Image (cartoon, rainbow, N blue to C red):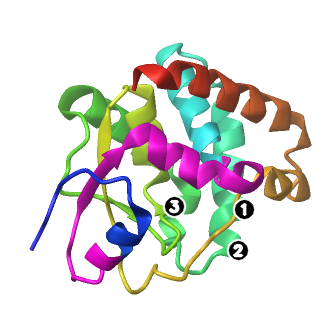
Amino acid sequence: MSICGETRDEKYLLNLFSIEGVCVEVPTMWLFKNSMKDNLYNAHLLVRYIAIERFYNRDDSWWKVYNEMQRKRVAMIPIIPREKAENEEAFKKLIMSFEKDGFIKDYPILVNKDLRLVDGSHRLALALYFKIEKVPITITKEYFDLDPEYSLDWFKEHGFNDIVAKIVDKYDEILGKGETL
């Protein structure tokens, strides 16, 4: 069963998600902002966004940052499939797929009980980049209480001090652009 519609009431969404398989479309910018609360809690989205930009500018320099981040994330979170540690080529294919087909709604973004991103950061970054107005989200029992943090603190603690300012700048830039989403 899949129910898709738009709502801004978080309590209503959580009640709706008690029905297995429910999918709800939410504004992309809302999901982005909600997922970034508390010191850019999902700052890894911005690393992906920058990788997308660099992909289109034919600048491979950022892939080193992306790959190192992926390896560190996969090593510390057992639920992330191990093959995601070396994900550059799969991400590039996903970028091309989005360019051709847009956001395929059969693959909703997984969020937790706080409606924060848990799985689907590549797709959310692509939805932002391609200015896709709404994205489908869902909650599963497996991810209900999961709350992986990739805030600015995570990046500092894992040796990415040199890119923190770039992440913050990209966040501010997207928020500036976000009024058109």
Q: Residue at x 29, y 83 (%)?
A: 18
Q: Position of residue 98 (x, y in %)?
A: 29, 34
Q: Is residue 55 in view? A: no
Q: Any magenta on residue 28?
A: yes
Whether pointer 1 and pointer 3 mark residues with C-beta atoms closer than 8 Å, the reply is no
Q: Quadrant of residue 120?
A: bottom left
Specify the segment rendered in magenta. Answer: 15-43
Relative side of 7 to 111, left or right? left
Mark 3 lies on residue: 84
- Using the numbered discs, state the Cα–Cα distance from disc 3 to disc 2 in whole angstroms: 12 Å
Secondary structure, mark 2, is: helix
Mark 2 lies on residue: 76
* Amino acid type, label 2: Met
Whether pointer 2 and pointer 1 mark residues with C-beta atoms closer than 8 Å, the reply is yes
Q: Position of residue 3 (x, y in %)?
A: 14, 64
Q: Residue at x 63, y 35 (%)?
A: 63
Q: Residue at x 64, y 69 (%)?
A: 148
- Using the numbered discs, state the Cα–Cα distance from disc 1 to disc 3 in whole angstroms: 10 Å
Q: Position of residue 103 (x, y in %)?
A: 26, 41
Q: Any magenta on residue 42?
A: yes
Residue lying at the far left in this picture: please name it: 1
Secondary structure, mark 3, is: helix
Tell me which numbered mark, 3 or 2, is placed earlier along the sequence: 2
